[in-house]
Structures are given as structure tokens and as C-alpha cells.
Image (cartoon, rainbow, N blue to C red):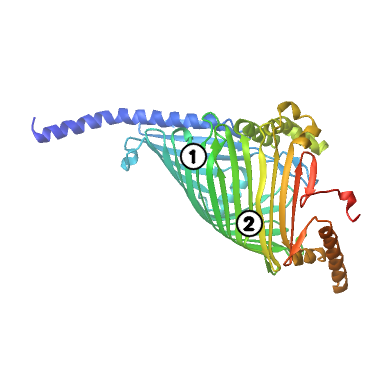
Amino acid sequence: MNRPTKIAAALAVIALSYPAAAWFAGQKIQTILDEQYAEMQSHPTLKIAERSYERGLFSSTEKVSFEMAMPFVAEDGTLQAGEPFRMHAINRIEHGPLPGLSTLAAATMDTELVIDGEQGERLAAALNGRAPLTARTVFQFDGSGRSAVDSPALEFGMPDGTGNELRIGLGGLKADVAFSAGLRSYTTKGTAESMSMEDPNMRITLSGLSFDGDQRRLFDDEPWLHVGRQRATVASMDVSGKEDSELDGMAFQLERMSYDIDVPAEGDYVDIKALIGTDVLRIGDADYGPAHYDFSLTHLHGRTLVTLWRKLIEIGSDPAALAAQAEDPTAVFAPLAEPAMALLGHNPAFSIDRVSFTSPHGKADLSAQLRLDGLQPEELANPMMLIAKLQAAADLSVPQALLLAFGSSEAENEDQAAFAAAQLDAQLGALEAQGYLQRSGGIVKTQAAFRQGQLTVNGKPFNPLALGGH
């Protein structure tokens, strides 16, 4: 067999075997999607209302309709069940091994997300018929893949549940998501030019958003608990009250915000560590930046945490629970009691690692820790045992001038302001004389601790009833 004949034979084999390979790839991608939707059904409020799948030899088309419970806060402050949020996705799938003759992969999938109902009609009009979100996903043969997500700039209005309109604007979003087989882990990276929300009372505008993350499942059989890290930054955020509204005159701006969440795991336990900061925190004419709020939750039992989360989400989608809450606001917490107490039985700890800001009078700092030490399951129902096992501590450092300014902020004239400041200064002097705080260099410092049922301030037993008795 000469060379041209060999090439022709090889091409013939490929041509004859390609339909079988494409059929196999089509079956593979349908199985991958079946598994993803099966796990999605375990979400407490997300429902797959309808799904159709038309599979061909070289391509397939899928349509999936979703419903999500959307509770809203009524005028009386109660949480009530609203109309479900409905949307559907149209997936156009090209089978491998050479989908669209453009790449080597198990399949490519082009997705269009469409919002249903009146909200969708408004959105479609605003976008001139374009989809509010599209994605192109490339699936590899092992089930892993990568999605490129794109959303155009848009602005639309929707009811806010109180008879008013909430206007939402998005300046366009782009994101890249890489995922492993079975969605066991994923990484994200994306940007959004701007976001805005506006109602009759105020307007919130954010610009220059970026985000990234690297997460994995803690448990293979639990698709809704991930550990890893997430980070987001915002170039600027502006919040302002509208003229002649309830919030008229309110205004603050933040610049160069950052939001870092790290969720490490050890065995069945997770920690949550959050670092939130902004270089500029402008309220009125005063800048209180740089400002930081760092907190952590440690030794959280993963399985119990998911149970608590599921119960919390289910409350918002259960009409019976919402109706009971309308009659008795405390009823909403009843389903949370058992998983919450079970979580406490694993001795978690909460810490405010840092609250700090820089005022015109100087820098203020606060830190605090809270934990239940050595709590046993049989002690959970005994409030006295909870108090005995509670351990807490706090440290505060704040400029005295800032305290005096806050203490006189409600004064109507200079004389009232001076009188209020003098009263507060005298109270601080009395606390200093009793050893409950120190004043040095214009800074007020104090520490508080609660252990074994005893409260101490600055190392001294503290009795609020005895204040001023020395």
C-alpha cells in the first residue's frame, strides 16, 4: 500500500469512527449535566421546574426552567412569601471530540439565560432582545471544564414588594470559571464596571468591581459547603439619600474597598476569617478612613453548619413558616434552635479581630473574643451552664476628643454642647478614679473580660450598680 493510499485509508477510518465518537461524547456530556442538575435539586429554595433535552448525533439542545423562592419584607416588617423568581437557560451543545471543528474537547456549550415573567419583559426591552447573561463552556473528557461568562450593561426596574419600584443597573460583567469533574472544586475571576440600586429613598452606586476565588467542597456528598478563599475589591461606593425623602441628607462614600474571606478546613471543622477594609470612609465632610472590620468564626462543625444553613434558607421559602412568623415574629427562630444548639455543642469561637477607623481626632481600635469553653451536649439546655462556660474579652482604645464629640452631637447650641462634653468628661474621670479605664495622651483605653460568670473591667471586678459609689 503506497503512501497516498495509507493516508486515504486513515482518513476513511477517522470519518467512519467519528460519528460513534460524537455519539459517545454526546452521551458523556448529557450524563455530566444530569449529575449537576440532580445535585442542584438539593438546594432548599432552588427548583428545576422543567427540563427538555433533544440529543442529536453531533449536537444537542437543552432547555431548563428554574424557580427560586423570593420572600420579601412587608410594610409591617414581617417576612412574607412572594412570587417565585423564574428563569430558564437555553443550552446549545456541540459534541466532541472536535466540537464545531474548533477545539479538542468532549463538548462545547453556549448558554443563554432568560428571565421569565414581567421582570423578564422589562429586561428584554432594556436589552433590545439580547440575553442578560451568556456563557460559553468547554467540557473536557474527564468532566472538568471552563466557562467564560458575559453580561451586557443593562438597567431595569422591578417591584420591591412595598408598592414602589426598585431600579437596578449593571455596567457589564465578565467572568472566567474553571471547574473540576463533578464541580468538586472551582476557581473564579471576573470584573464588573458598575452596579447601582435606586428606590424612592436612596441610591447606591458601585464602580470598578473585581473578584476572584479558589474553592473546593469540604464533603464530596455536600454540594453547598465550600472551603477556600474569596476576594473582592470595589474602586468606589456612593450611598446618598434622595431629596425630600426619609433619608434626605444622608451621604457617605467609600473608596478602594476590599473584602477577603478565607475558609480553611481541618477534618470536619471549618474556620471563617474575614478582612473587610476601605481606604476612604467619608461621612458628610469627615473622612474616617482607613477603616477595617476583621472578624473570625472558628471550630465550626461542617455538617452541623450546613444543617443550620439549610433550615435558615427553608424558612424563607415555606409559606407556613412565614405565616406563623407574621403572627409571632419569634416563631421564625424555632426551627433554628436545634441545629444552632448542636453547633454550639462543638465549642465554636467568635472573634472581632479588629474594628478600627481614623477620625479627625485620632485612631480608634476595638477587638473582642467570645467562646463557650468545654460545653457538653447535656448542658446546652441549661442557661446557667451556658453563662458559666462563656468566655469573652474586649479591648478598646479611642480618642477622648472623639467621645466628647459624640456625646455632644445632639446638642442644639454651643452651650448645650459644652455642658454635655463637661458631663461626659466628669463621668470618664470617675471611671478612671475607680480603675476602670486609663487616659493618657488624649486616648481612653480599657479592657473587659467575662470568665466563670464574673465580669471584670481593666482587671477589676465590675458591678454596674456600684458605679459612682466611690
**Residue 391: assigned label:** none
Residue under label 1: 90
Q: Amino acid at mark 2?
A: His
| Residue at image location 48% in from the left, 29% down from the top | 34
Instruction: Note whether 376 is above or below 100 in the view shown.
Output: above
Q: Secondary structure at mark 1?
A: strand
Res. 413 image quadrant: bottom right
Image side of residue 109 versus residue 281, left or right: left
| Residue 340 horizontal/vertical position (percent) | 70, 33
Image side of residue 387 versus residue 11, left or right: right
| Front position among marks 2 and 1 | 2
Image side of residue 20 versus residue 418, left or right: left
| Residue at image location 51% in from the left, 47% down from the top | 133
Crowdedness near tag 2: few (<14), some (14–19) or many (≥20) residues, C-alpha within 10 Å: many
Residue under label 2: 292
Crowdedness near tag 1: few (<14), some (14–19) or many (≥20) residues, C-alpha within 10 Å: some
Q: Amino acid at mark 1?
A: Ile
| Residue 282 horizontal/vertical position (percent) | 66, 65
| Residue 37 horizontal/vertical position (percent) | 52, 32
| Residue 281 horizontal/vertical position (percent) | 65, 62
Q: Quadrant of the C terminus?
A: bottom right
Contact? badges 2 and 1 (CB < 8 Å): no
